[in-house]
Image (tube, grey):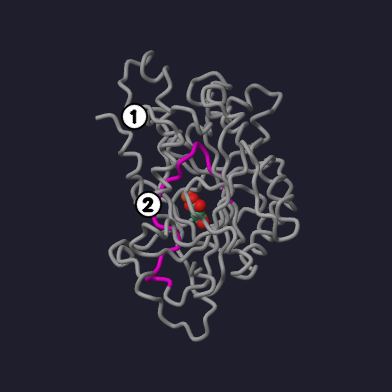
Amino acid sequence: MNSVKALAESPDLRHIPSIYVNSANSTEPPALDPEDAIPTIDFSLLTSDDAYLRSQVVKELDIACKDWGFFRVINHGVPESLMNMVIEKSKEFFDMSDEEKKEFEEKDVLDPIRYGTSFNSKKDEIFYWRDFLKVIVHPEFTCPNKPLGFREVVLEYSKRTREVVKELLRGISRSLGLDQSYVEKTLKLESGLQIFVANLYPPCPQPDLAIGFPPHSDHGLLTLLINNGVGGLQIKHKGKWVNINNNLPNSFLVNTGDQLQVFSNGRYSSVEHRAVVNNAATRLSVVVVNGPSLDEVVEPAKKFVTEEGCSPAYIPMKYKEYLEMQQGNQIVGKTCLDRVRAV
Ligand SMILES: O=C(O)CCC(=O)C(=O)O
Ligand SMILES: [Fe+2]
């Protein structure tokens, strides 16, 4: 495998190889800073003793999911030291020699450990300026056994973030007008899929020509993201690309995924996002994608199609099939969702 890290470190690299030139860059207007503040959810209020405060934060979640599909979460209880460790240890993973990383190279999209480059280097027509490590951490925990201490940190991080996701989904269940445990019960979250993803975007000599991660939506229900303080994430908001500057310490960036769009029959749309690169600093992001159980057939919740007299906008599909379809092909915006749209 030819990692972008090795390419970026090659001496005298002034031009990127043509396979990395993303022609869409020249046709898309540059991203702007968002006009409105990105919603911030105070996680601690979701479990407050005060019913009024709880209902207020549920309303805020509803607005955040409807208007943005994207929000920051503060006061979530995950120690800042753990978040820093996860970034640090992920960096150490990529810093290992090519020889050491080789044993984790991806072979199949459902391999529990996948170290790779671009998105799907077997299918991508152009390559993305990104190396990645994807690890399935739930329902069964796996993790590379190096670098030293990585496994322990990833295990703790996956447990703590799963707790955050569970509580957020209880809030979202309520904001959709369902029982608070409806989402977790219906989609069998106790055996839900959780994937830990570390993305590395080395400095790029021609950042305007390349792209780190092309426009896409995430396949699961909710994604939690942190990074090493270097900007690059952009989301599509009201039809325009906007920059997300993670300038709030100790917070998670959270976005809604495709399975939530299907389950809510389109009430909460998954948000399209991408990562751009720069020529000065390495960016590292750590993402946890949280989905239903792999064997679960996901379809719009009954309430949205029977009680409310709407027709289902999506056909039922096993999450595992959806995942294989999304991960096993090129990634093009939200086109994967079109395959489950009811006609
Ligand atoms: O690196 C980022 O900011 C975005 C990564 C991402 O969208 C993903 O891993 O799904
Ligand atoms: Fe993503």
Residue type at numbered disc 1:
Tyr
Under circle 1, the secondary element is loop
Does the Cβ of the disc 1 residue fall within 8 Å of ligand 2? no
Residue for badge 2: 331
Residue 158 x %, y %: 66, 43
Q: Is residue 288 magenta?
A: no
Residue at 53% x, 34% y is 61
Q: Which residues are magenta?
A: 207-225
Residue 193 x %, y %: 56, 37
| Placement of the C terminus among the 4 image quadrants | top left
Under circle 2, the secondary element is loop
Residue at 75% x, 53% y is 81
**320 or 342: nearer the viewer:** 320
Query: In this image, 147 relative to 23: left or right?
Result: right
Seen in the picture, residue 94 relative to 46 is either above or below; the reply is below
Residue 98 x %, y %: 59, 69
Query: In this image, 176 relative to 167: left or right?
Result: left
Residue for badge 1: 314
**320 or 40: nearer the viewer:** 320
Does the Cβ of the disc 2 residue fall within 8 Å of ligand 2? no
Extreme residue in the top direction: 307
Residue at 55% x, 39% y is 290
Seen in the picture, residue 210 relative to 174 is either above or below; the reply is below
